[in-house]
Image: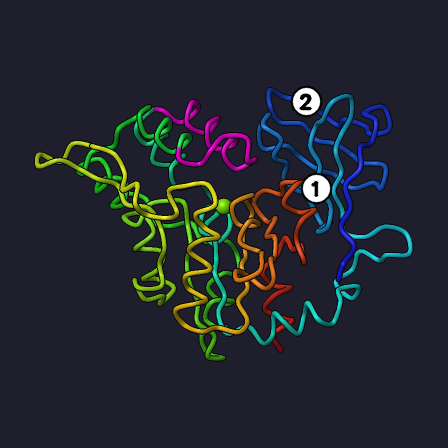
Amino acid sequence: MATLRSRLVPSSSCSFARRTGEAVSVRSPQGVKFQSLSSFGSWKVVAGETRLALREAGGGVMVAHAGSGENATSSGSLAAEVVATWQNAQAVCFDVDSTVCEDEGIDELAAFCGAGDAVAAWTARAMGGSVPFEDALAARLALFRPSVKTLAKFLDTRPPRFSKGIRELVSKLQSRGTDVYLVSGGFRQMIAPVAAQLHIPSDNVFANTLLFGDDGEFTGFDATEPTSRSGGKAQAIEQIKKEHGYQTLVMIGDGATDLEARRPGGADLFICYGGVVARPSVVAGADWFVTSFKDLIESLD
Ligand SMILES: [Mg+2]
């Protein structure tokens, strides 16, 4: 298995290439350049390098990386068992926001409704695992209360923004007979077009449901969906595995709730996708960290 480590590097040993508002470019001691996406601890890898993630932490920059020194950082250092589990997976479950799609659906909908900044702050906190998921969901929705009409308008004007390579990866898995699922803390109404374009049946979609009153006004979300709660994704994964009797199931995502699914009875392998956002705590807990789906596509050959 790849060695994944985190360590605190003093800010003084990193050169901050520029700081403009919340965007900060950093050159780490290893000479790799990063750029922050927000001030909430999520950082995006800017160019080339695929195996490092960092964020500001008390007095320094937290760097999480796969291997160092004699533990090579190339995918060649992955344990054969990780690759074998991936190749032999009977089911692969994908997170949607910042994994299958390049954005966070609720943030996009909130921005459409004029509450983008406030809601993005909530999303970042929830994804870092510091706020119970259900609290963050309720709080964020309360900030903009989307109606049926607004949602329809949003879906009409804004097609899904798929991450590069995801269509090819899903199609390749399906052609090998691997069952593909979408397991998301987002909303079914917004994920349906994503699933349709990826030829994923609606039965294979586990997500939340927005609720509306008779005249189409927002009334809340279905709190009985397991994905509406902290730990809910892990529960959904266990349910999928049990119901279908899968021996090997792989979870791919970018968030703390995706990583939680990797446990006995749940996902047998967790692949952290950092192509949109790489969160150090999630990277550090992953069996495999990739920033491009190309790595996963090629390893199926
Ligand atoms: Mg996500």
Is 71 positioned to the left or the right of 160 in the image? right
The magenta segment is 115-134
Q: Is residue 64 left or right of residue 101?
A: right
> What residue is rendered at 74% in x and 39% in y?
33
* Earlier-in-chain disc, 2 versus 1: 2
CB-based contact (under 8 Å), mark 2 and mark 1: no
**Residue matched to label 1:** 53
CA distance separating discs 2 and 1:
18 Å
Residue drawn at 52 percent across, 37 percent down: 127
Residue 159 magenta-highlighted: no
Q: Which residue is mark 2?
A: 19
Residue at the spot 47% in from the left edge and 74% down from the top edge: 178
For the residues carrying marks 2 and 1, which lies nearer the camera in this image? 1
Compare residues 152 and 147 and report the one nearer the observer: 147
Q: Position of residue 5 (x, y in %)?
A: 78, 46
Give the left or right position of residue 131, taking residue 52 as reference. left
